[in-house]
């Protein structure tokens, strides 16, 4: 499979060629880079973090996990596309380096230290991928295996977090004196929860505290956990299993990765593994194991990846499509799906009150909810991580497009009754959530283009002016801005239907108007 | 393989060692099991057993590291019957045994450094590799701190004929204790005790300075470097010389090469377009006439072999001459009169 079948070998750097030729500087430290791995200052330490992450990716896909898929597609020239069958199923051959989501996203999760849920049927390698992430962080196989938390219906909080030491329990005169034997996994930088949907509800709450707030508490004792990348597995993504997963815990999942099916044309590789007794987790090359310092540096480097203004606008425009729900309130600020949900209102009944809008065209009609702050921050983190992985200093449009479906997979709740799904071949999007979200983003970007918002975006212009600050701004200028805001709102109110993306724009203008108004009052008072 | 710490280490982690071998064999079907086994039974076993004799708890780590290093080299035909480098086996047999304490402390790092260094030097300057091995064997027993073998190896690489590393190697040299500073320059530490700082200052100031030499200098051709590309050199046609960014640059129409030259040797290295400095005129104090009359810093010399030169380039301390019908560049400098290199 692929051209790298020697399991211990790491792909030759660079794994993503295309950068400029190296400068002709001579450093005698290069003397120790060579065919034998392990030299200090040798290849693996000289590899920048992004290159090391790519080497880890290629080692895993070529040697550890048989995942011969390229569902995260990049092309630097128009890809060839073939259509199959009556429904014209499209298969494209990407023209640039593309990736398997099943391996890439857990790796990105390691880089940004978030929470990754691996879902899929049994025996698809979910636990193996999580174990590999632990090995890449420098833990031994034995440590990882001991530290995996296996969800089962009898799991108690003590099983999960630890036990008070019996001797201190007897002798303690107050809770503060009780010593807790905390479970070792709490202090690890990679945390693996296997079959989290088999953990009883009460214990899920204790898990939530650790996942959400990074500490464990028992008998008034607190254990502060170090930052960690989390890997949770579940056998299906409906939150079912033995116990319903509490919503707060589900909401803490940052990215959902599906275990892809096994391509039977690679059965020979499985046979070879059986015959060789090959276990990839036993021979992870040293060169791709990250130290704690490297993981910290990588996280910092990911944060430094830039987000260009035009892409940020597209993300804003996309994210703004979903929250607005006109029938949910009388005051604009409360016209949100969240208002309806909190009131326990019948969404379908409320929705039927909306008139005048093309619901098939309205992207917001496809969801029951909007995007939270947390999900937007997670999206930005993972997009930056993907750009970092690809060796870019700033994110690209395709990075955004590829990552959003995985990050928002469990964040956007689909409204399957939306008329959109009755159009054309859209029925499959009720089931294929990744394609559905990607399609939502594509449609949003098309609308963005149609409205020509890069060229004409009064909210952006007014925001930029405001962002320059109010220091030294005189009364005349303030009044000019207020007039501009009022004129824009007047134009909109007279000519346009109220769609989701306008909702945040209107409220932003209200915000700016209020800020200028308060400042004007102060200027006048000061006079 | 009977008995011994190495045999015990192999037996204890047999599954993993076998998996590694199988993986390497899948990628390199020509990997000869017999040759590999002979290498393990010979130098690897000797090294691991040697480590075990003084550091018994480090034997398993040494075994694993040396096993993997061996596989890396066999996979690439750098060891074994098809090896292209006759010196690498000598690293196993002659050099590594002198550093058992370093092998015990960091088996993967120490072995990789020594093996990679010899591999790289052989690729750059085959003649320098044997010299480096000999001198490293002489210096290694005097190393004590864990980083010293690596630092000495870097300095020796420069001293044995890789002048492009001069600047960085000098910085490394300054990190060494005095006795190793002197040893890596080929000087007796007892005879030159207390002189390292002064020697270092002269090395930094004068690239033609030869430590331990008589101090006498003469204007002479110190090296002929370059050559025809078809015979392993860099130039497709006889190059034209110029000075850019303070260095001599040779151009043959297809590319530009920067000359790195000092008392340790001369070599051309290809330059990326952005790496060339601004063009500069020749140093007027150093020149050669069409008759081969050399003027160097007020001194005069003559060379009939260099008459009719096609171009020359001179900096403050070097004159490079190219002939019309030669792919070589002749480097003239005020070099040590002694014939024996330090």
Image: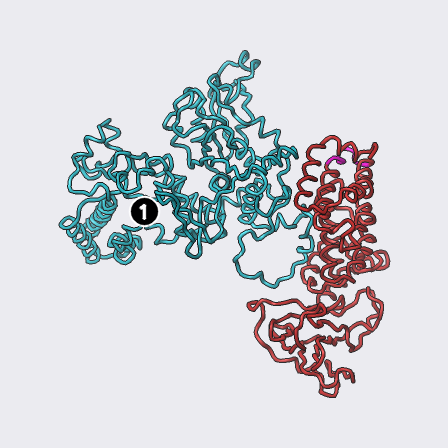
Chief secondary structure of the magenta portion: helix
Q: Chain B is drawn in which colour?
A: red
Q: Which residue lies furthest to the bottom in this view?
A: B291
Q: In this view, does B170 lie above or below A146?
A: below
Q: In this view, does A71 lie above or below A261?
A: below
What residue appears at the point 63 percent right and 45 percent down from the top-left corner? Answer: A9
Indicate left or right for A224 with A453 as reference.
Answer: right
Quarter of the rendering occupied by the N terminus of chain A = top right
Q: Colour of chain A?
A: cyan
Q: Name the residue under label 1.
A: A316
> Which quadrant of the figure has residue A481?
bottom left
What residue appears at the point 28 percent right and 58 percent down from the top-left corner? Answer: A455
Give the tally of numbered discs.
1
Q: Which residue lies furthest to the front in this view?
A: A86
What residue appears at the point 24 percent right and 54 percent down from the top-left corner? Answer: A458
- Start-end of magenta stretch: B54-60
In percent of width and height, residue A368 lies at 28, 34
Indicate left or right for B327 with A440 as reference.
Answer: right
In percent of width and height, residue A137 lies at 57, 38
The answer to if A428 sits in the magenta stretch is no
In percent of width and height, residue B290 lies at 71, 87
Q: Is mark 1 on a helix, strand or loop?
A: helix
> Which quadrant of the figure has residue A379?
top left
In percent of width and height, residue A437 lies at 35, 41
Q: Residues within 10 Å of mark 1 (few under 14, many from 20)?
A: some
Res A94 visible = yes
Chain to which mark 1 belongs: A
């Amino acid at each position: 499979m692929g051209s790298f079948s020697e399991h211990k070998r790491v792909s030759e750097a660079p794994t993503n060629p295309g950068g400029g030729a190296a400068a002709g500087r001579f450093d005698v430290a290069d003397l120790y880079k060579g065919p034998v791995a392990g030299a200090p200052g040798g290849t693996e330490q000289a590899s920048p973090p992004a290159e090391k992450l790519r080497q880890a990716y290629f080692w895993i896909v070529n040697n550890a996990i048989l995942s011969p898929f390229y569902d995260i597609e990049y092309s630097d020239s128009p890809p060839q596309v073939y259509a199959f069958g009556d429904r014209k199923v499209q298969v494209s051959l990407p023209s640039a380096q593309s990736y398997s989501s099943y391996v890439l996203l857990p790796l990105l999760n390691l880089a940004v230290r978030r929470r990754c849920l691996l879902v899929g049927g049994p025996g698809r390698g979910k636990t193996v991928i999580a174990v590999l992430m632990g090995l890449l962080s420098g833990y031994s196989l034995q440590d990882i295996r001991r530290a995996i938390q296996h969800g089962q219906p009898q799991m108690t909080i003590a099983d999960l977090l630890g036990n008070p030491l019996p001797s201190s329990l007897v002798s303690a005169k107050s809770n503060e004196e009780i010593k807790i034997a905390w479970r070792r996994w709490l202090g690890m930088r990679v945390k693996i929860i296997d079959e989290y949907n088999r953990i009883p509800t009460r214990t899920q709450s204790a898990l939530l505290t650790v996942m959400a707030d990074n500490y464990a508490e028992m008998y008034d004792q607190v254990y502060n956990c170090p930052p960690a990348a989390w890997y949770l597995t579940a056998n299906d993504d409906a939150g079912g299993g033995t116990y319903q997963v509490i919503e707060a815990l589900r909401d803490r999942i940052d990215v959902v990765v599906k275990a892809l099916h096994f391509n039977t044309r690679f059965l020979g590789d499985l046979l070879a593994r059986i015959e060789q007794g090959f276990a990839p987790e036993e021979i992870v090359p040293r060169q791709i194991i990250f130290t704690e310092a490297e993981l910290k540096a990588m996280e910092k480097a990911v944060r430094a990846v830039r987000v260009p203004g035009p892409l940020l606008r597209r993300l804003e425009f996309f994210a703004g499509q979903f929250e607005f729900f006109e029938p949910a309130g009388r005051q604009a600020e409360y016209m949100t799906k969240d208002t309806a949900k909190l009131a326990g209102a019948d969404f379908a009944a409320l929705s039927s009150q909306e008139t005048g809008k093309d619901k098939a065209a309205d992207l917001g009609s496809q969801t029951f909810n909007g995007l939270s702050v947390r999900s937007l921050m997670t999206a930005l983190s993972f997009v930056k991580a993907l750009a970092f992985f690809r060796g870019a200093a700033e994110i690209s449009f395709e990075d955004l497009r590829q990552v959003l479906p995985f990050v928002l997979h469990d964040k956007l709740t689909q409204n399957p009754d939306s008329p959109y799904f009755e159009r054309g071949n859209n029925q499959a999007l009720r089931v294929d959530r990744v394609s559905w979200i990607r399609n939502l983003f594509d449609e949003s970007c098309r609308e963005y283009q149609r409205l020509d918002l890069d060229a004409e975006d009064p909210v952006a212009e007014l925001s930029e002016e405001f962002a320059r600050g109010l220091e030294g701004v005189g009364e005349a200028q303030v009044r000019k801005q207020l007039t501009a805001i009022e004129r824009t709102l007047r134009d909109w109110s007279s000519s346009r239907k109220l769609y989701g993306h306008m909702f945040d724009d209107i409220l932003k203008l209200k915000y700016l108007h209020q800020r200028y108004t308060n400042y004007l009052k102060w200027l006048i008072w000061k006079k | 393989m009977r008995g011994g710490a190495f045999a015990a280490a192999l037996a204890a982690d047999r599954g993993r060692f076998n998996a590694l071998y199988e993986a390497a064999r899948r990628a390199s079907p020509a990997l000869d099991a017999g040759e590999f086994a002979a290498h393990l039974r010979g130098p690897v076993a000797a090294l691991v057993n040697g480590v075990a004799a003084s550091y018994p708890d480090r034997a398993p780590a040494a075994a694993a590291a040396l096993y993997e290093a061996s596989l890396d080299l066999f996979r690439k035909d750098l060891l074994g019957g098809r090896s292209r480098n006759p010196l690498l086996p000598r690293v196993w047999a002659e050099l590594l045994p002198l550093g058992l304490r370093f092998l015990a402390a960091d088996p993967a790092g120490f072995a990789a450094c020594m093996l990679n260094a010899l591999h790289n030097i052989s690729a750059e300057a085959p003649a320098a590799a044997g010299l480096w091995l000999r001198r490293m064997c002489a210096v290694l027993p005097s190393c004590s701190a864990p980083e010293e073998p690596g630092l000495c190896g870097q300095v020796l690489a420069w001293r044995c004929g890789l002048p492009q590393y001069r600047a960085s190697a000098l910085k490394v040299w300054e990190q060494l204790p005095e006795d190793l500073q002197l040893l890596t320059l080929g000087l007796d530490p007892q005879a030159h005790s207390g002189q390292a700082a002064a020697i270092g200052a002269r090395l930094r100031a004068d690239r033609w300075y030869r430590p331990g030499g008589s101090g006498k200098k003469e204007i002479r051709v110190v090296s002929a470097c370059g050559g025809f590309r078809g015979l392993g050199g860099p130039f497709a046609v006889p190059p034209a010389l110029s000075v850019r960014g303070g260095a001599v640059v040779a151009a043959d129409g297809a590319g530009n090469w920067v000359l790195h030259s000092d008392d340790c040797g001369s070599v051309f290295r290809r330059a990326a377009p952005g790496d060339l400095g601004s063009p500069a005129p020749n140093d007027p104090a150093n020149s050669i006439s069409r008759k081969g009359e050399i003027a160097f810093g007020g001194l005069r010399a003559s060379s009939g072999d260099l008459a009719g030169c096609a171009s020359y380039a001179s900096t403050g301390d070097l004159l490079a001459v190219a002939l019309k019908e030669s792919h070589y560049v002749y480097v003239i400098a005020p070099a040590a009169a002694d014939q024996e290199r330090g």
